[in-house]
Amino acid sequence: MTFAGNSEGFTSFDTSRSNETNDGGNKDDDGIGPTGSGKDESESENRISVTEDGTDNGIPEPPTVFPEGDLRETESCPEEPAHNDHGTTPSSEWENPLSSSENGSGDGGGGGDRGVVTRFFGVRGYGTKFVWVIDRSGSMYGSKLSQVIKEVLQSLSDLNDKCQFNIIIYDDRFDVWRPGGKLMTADTANRKDAERFVQDITSRGGTEHRLPLLEAIKYKPEVIFFLTDGQSLKQTELEEICHASGNISINVIQFDDGYDGRSEILRQLALRNKGQYKYINVATSDAL
């Protein structure tokens, strides 16, 4: 991997050689790995045990205990309102994670009462430490990228000076708004600088998800918002990211032109990291 500085203060990292550790380069058109196993536990945790003669004895059975890492199928959330808080009207399907938080955020640093709620395409994250990982590949050109820029800017406006953040944009390389491994305080000056960085995003290149996601994890946020229109994440890469992510919540927003459909491996990335998965069919969305 090579990197070079530029006049705008961020660093571009070349991930084109990632196939040396990655079983081959990734593109947008394939690479969906095996799905994770799921269980549908439809019985209540407060069941009454039944004796052999068919009568209950009034003693509640203990709740089912799931082994660590065990995945259960989640229920689909109801459709979003016709207009969400950011004024968009996406045609989408989204799911809640196995998280105890209504916002689907992780417990990575404990936002507590100091935290804020920010939204990205209607997906909520709660905390004080955020990283956005945005696909800028060639297939994101036009209205898709324009809407992404608008949503990032709106998300940044939700932050206050108690929050910290960073932004990573990627194709087959990735650029970090403020490289160096530290999140930046979301004061007015930094938010304005980040807005300029986001507004300058243009589409280009292929798609390499693995390295920008691993880079985002290095910043130790509580919440990652990950947006892509590519499906080329391999099962081995999924396992590597899940192993590295610790207690970070990873929310996944998948754009689709109407051909590939929902990516199970991207869905697993969210579910296994206490995040939300949201699918947006851009072919039928009024917002794009």
Image (cartoon, rainbow, N blue to C red):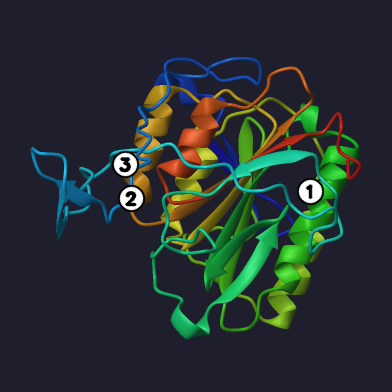
224 lies left or right of 192: left
Residues marked 2 and 1 touching at CB (< 8 Å): no
How would you rate the neighbour count of disc 2 (Cα within 10 Å): few for under 14, some for 14-19, many for 20 or more?
few
Q: Residues within 10 Å of mark 1 (few under 14, many from 20)?
A: many
Image location of residue 132, percent across then percent down: 62, 54
Q: Which residue does the image show at 65% across and 15% down from the upper left? A: 29
Name the residue tied to disc 3: 243
In the rendered structure, find residue 44 and report the number of the disc placed on it. 2
Q: Quadrant of residue 72?
A: top left
Left or right, residue 139 beside residue 172: right
Say which amino acid is labelled 1: Val
Of the residues tagged 2 and 1, which is closer to the observer? 2
116 left or right of 92?
Answer: left
Q: Camera-side residue: 42 or 122? A: 42
- What residue sits 73% from the left and 39% below the top? 92
Which residue position holds label 1? Answer: 148
Observer-side mark, 3 or 2, equals 2
CA–CA distance between discs 3 and 2? Answer: 31 Å
Q: Amino acid at mark 3?
A: His
Q: CA distance from mark 1 to mark 3?
A: 28 Å
Q: Residues within 10 Å of mark 3 (few under 14, many from 20)?
A: few
